[in-house]
Amino acid sequence: METISEDAEAELELDKIRKKYANLGDSVVAVKLERTPKAGLGLSLAGHRDRSRMAVFVCGLHPAGAAAKASPPVKVGDEILEVNGIVLHGRCHLNASAIIKGLIGPVFKIILLRRKSALEDVAVKPLNPSQFPVALEEESEDRFAGYKGVRDITIKKGPSGLGIMIIEGRHTEAGRGIFVSDLQEGSAAEQAGLQIGDMILAVNRDSLLSCSYDGAAAKLKQTEGVVVLTVCSPNMKDDKADDGGTTPAGGSATSGPASRNQTPDPGKAASRPVTPRPAPSPVKAEPPPDPATAPIAANQDTVIELSTASEPLGIVLLGGSDTLINGAAAIILDVYKNGAVAKDGRLRVGDQIRDCNGVTITKDMAHERLCLTIKQKVPKMKMTIYRPEPLQYTEVEVELSRKPGRALGLTYVAPVQGTGVYLGDAIAGSPADLDGRLQRGDFLLSVDGKDLSAADYITVATTLKLCGNKTAIKVKRFKVIAR
């Protein structure tokens, strides 16, 4: 019986991968990295300079990291296609960073596309080694000696999860990090002694000091059974909390409430005592509406809380820096009948989500990251909602040309709520896709002057099938309302 050596097996596997990405070019490289307890991967990632294109590029290498020491070594300008079988080609680099940080090592198999001209496509200039931390070595036992009130908290994770809400922020003394912004009442984390305002330094000894919100959320989500959190209390001073605060990344965000019906000032997630907090006293004078039942008011921010029972929200979202709707909010395009949002009954099409569970939606968030921020499976979700009345749109009219017998490439969806249709994703390589001025979520108004704003799916399909080789398409598109 003939046996195949490991090297031959690896070469066969690489041939398969090269065939898979043959349309991208011949320079496909496979690199195996090992993240040992004393070293990190040492990768810095960036996106494509053309914001309409998704890609994950290596923009920097730490000289002490595994990537720089690999054989063959990773190079600045390499495009990451896969990591451990997870396809990153065509994805947002922020999402890719969260995926990589959330993977359980120590071995990482990375598939790279290497092109000479790739550096021209990278969104940022290559990083110098001096721009990385001084060392990547894992800190010794006293690695967190510079932080106040460092302690380990052991939590037994149950079916309802840990019950933690986190925020990425910066504390005046402790610096940038991941902070506890709220705790689910009666949760495993609260019972174990975790405090609102604690800074999470490590999860199961895996440091979060250089971790983004997405990476930290992924690590917490992947934990099972008994979880050990290493935390500190940045504001501890003689067993009292001082006035230092945490500034959330990307602007203001709602931190944990002083009482369950109260929304405090933004940016103070860390200003809490480290001693066990007493039971919250009720608010006596004109308390704000309970977020769990508060109706959504028109033309102003409303904080609501959804009890989702960890079920899917059941909504379609629009927005993101890589779309034609770019602003500091996600817009609800459609609401499915059996999702948690429909069961709650308060949100509707056109509502704008401005933050979710303490994370502010910012203009530089790509669509995929925006969706990951909002579409979480957690028992409760707290959101800030803005409802514009009347709804505001931008009208767009384009002329598409096609060859005889070829389709325009438009797809369309009948909404769950309302009449007419909205556009789905354009077929790749079609006239609609190459033109680029129409996008998913645009509401179809007319085709060659024929009003289709209230037409059913079949009428739209028939009209588009019979249109000429030059076709005028008119749509309306939601607008994000600035604060």
Image (cartoon, rainbow, N blue to C red):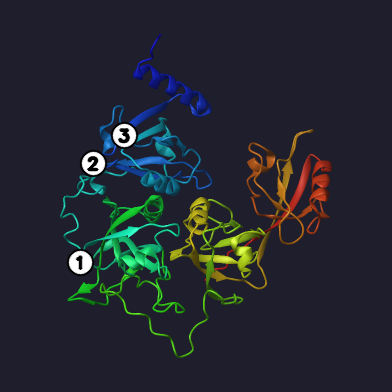
Q: Looking at the rendering, which quadrant does residue 121 occupy? A: top left
Tell me, for residue 194, which label it has, or none: none
> In the displayed structure, does residue 53 sit left or right of residue 202?
right
Q: Picture coordinates of residue 92 (x, y %)?
A: 47, 46
Taking 121 as reference, is 398 above or below it?
A: below
Residues at discs 2 and 1 in contact (Cβ within 8 Å): no
Alpha-carbon span between mark 2 and mark 1 = 26 Å
Q: Farthest residue to the top: give it.
A: 1
> In the displayed structure, does residue 354 sit left or right of residue 392?
left
Q: Secondary structure at mark 1?
A: loop
Alpha-carbon span between mark 1 and mark 3 = 35 Å
* Mark 2 / mark 1, whichever is N-terminal: 2
**To which residue does mark 3 refer?**
33
* Mark 1 / mark 3, whichever is N-terminal: 3
Residue at coordinates 37% horizontally, 33% vertically from top-left?
A: 109
Q: Judge the density around disc 2: few (<14), some (14-19), many (≥20) Cα neighbours within 10 Å.
A: some
Q: Picture coordinates of residue 398 (x, y %)?
A: 71, 50
Tell me, for residue 148, which label it has, or none: 1
Residue at coordinates 35% horizontally, 19% vertically from top-left?
A: 6
Tell me, for residue 39, which label it has, or none: 2
Quarter of the image with the N terminus is: top left
Residue at coordinates 20% horizontally, 66% vertically from top-left?
A: 148
Q: Picture coordinates of residue 213 (x, y %)?
A: 38, 56
